[in-house]
Image (cartoon, rainbow, N blue to C red):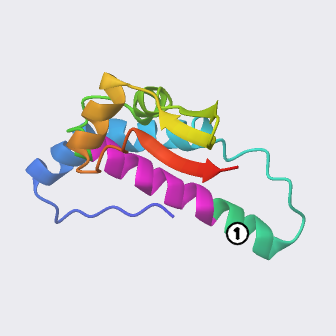
């Protein structure tokens, strides 16, 4: 549906046009990073649920980017957070799961106000 609002002030029209790149970037994100396709569902309600989850993922991705003041994309945020690893270490007493170090991940989590995980993630005696 095409709608023309002739009552909009020029400043709102210009701002909307300047912000068009944000909408275009969101479509690229949902098609590439979130990977909305292929939809491997046949039932309409499952297809709707799939698209809903993808749009919800886009919202979360944009919130992450906003928390970083739009300085980096969700792809870069994801890459930096993926530097954090859980490393299982077998000891005489059991298995201890340790966290790797990542200054990039620490910076991302700090800006998002998410606590950095402790050095020892779990300990399972044998």
Taking the image as drawn, is residue 19 in sight?
A: no
19 vs 88, nearest the viewer: 88
Residue 22 spot, x, y in % from top left: 34, 40
Horizontal side of residue 12 vs 81, given as left or right? left
32 vs 20, nearest the viewer: 32
Residue 64 spot, x, y in % from top left: 34, 46
19 vs 33, nearest the viewer: 33
Q: Provide the residue designation for mark 1.
A: 48
Assess whether residue 125 is covered by the magenta stretch. Answer: no
Q: Residue furthest front?
A: 92
Horizontal side of residue 6 vs 4, given as left or right? left
Q: Looking at the image, is 126 positioned above or below residue 85?
A: below
Residue 65 spot, x, y in % from top left: 32, 41
Q: Bin the neighbour count of mark 1 within 10 Å (Cα to Cα): few under 14, some 14-19, many 20 and up.
A: few
Q: Residue furthest bottom?
A: 45
Q: Residue at x 15, y 53 (%)?
A: 12
Q: Looking at the image, is 121 positioned above or below residue 81?
A: below
Q: Looking at the image, is 122 positioned above or below residue 102?
A: below
Residue 94 spot, x, y in % from top left: 65, 43
- Residue 30 falls in which quadrant of the image? top right
Q: Residue at x 27, y 64 (%)?
A: 5
Taking the image as drawn, is residue 2 in sight?
A: yes
SS for tag 1? helix
- Residue 105 falls in which quadrant of the image? top left
Q: Looking at the image, is 2 positioned above or below residue 109?
A: below
Horizontal side of residue 41 vs 23, given as left or right? right
Total labels: the figure holds 1
Type of secondary structure dominating the magenta stretch: helix
What residue range appears in magenta? 52-66
81 vs 98, nearest the viewer: 98
Q: Residue at x 20, y 38 (%)?
A: 69
Q: Residue at x 87, y 71 (%)?
A: 43
């Amino acid at each position: 549906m095409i709608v023309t609002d002739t009552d909009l002030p020029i400043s709102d029209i210009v701002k909307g046009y300047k912000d068009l790149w944000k909408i275009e970037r969101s479509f690229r994100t949902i098609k590439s990073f979130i990977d909305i396709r292929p939809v491997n569902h046949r039932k309409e309600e499952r297809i709707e649920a799939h698209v809903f989850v993808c749009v919800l993922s886009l919202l979360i991705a944009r919130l992450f980017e906003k928390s970083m003041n739009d300085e980096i994309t969700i792809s870069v945020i994801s890459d930096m957070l993926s530097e954090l690893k859980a490393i299982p270490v077998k000891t005489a007493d059991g298995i201890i799961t340790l966290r790797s170090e990542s200054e990039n991940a620490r910076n991302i989590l700090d800006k998002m106000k998410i606590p950095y995980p402790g050095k020892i993630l779990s300990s399972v005696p044998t």
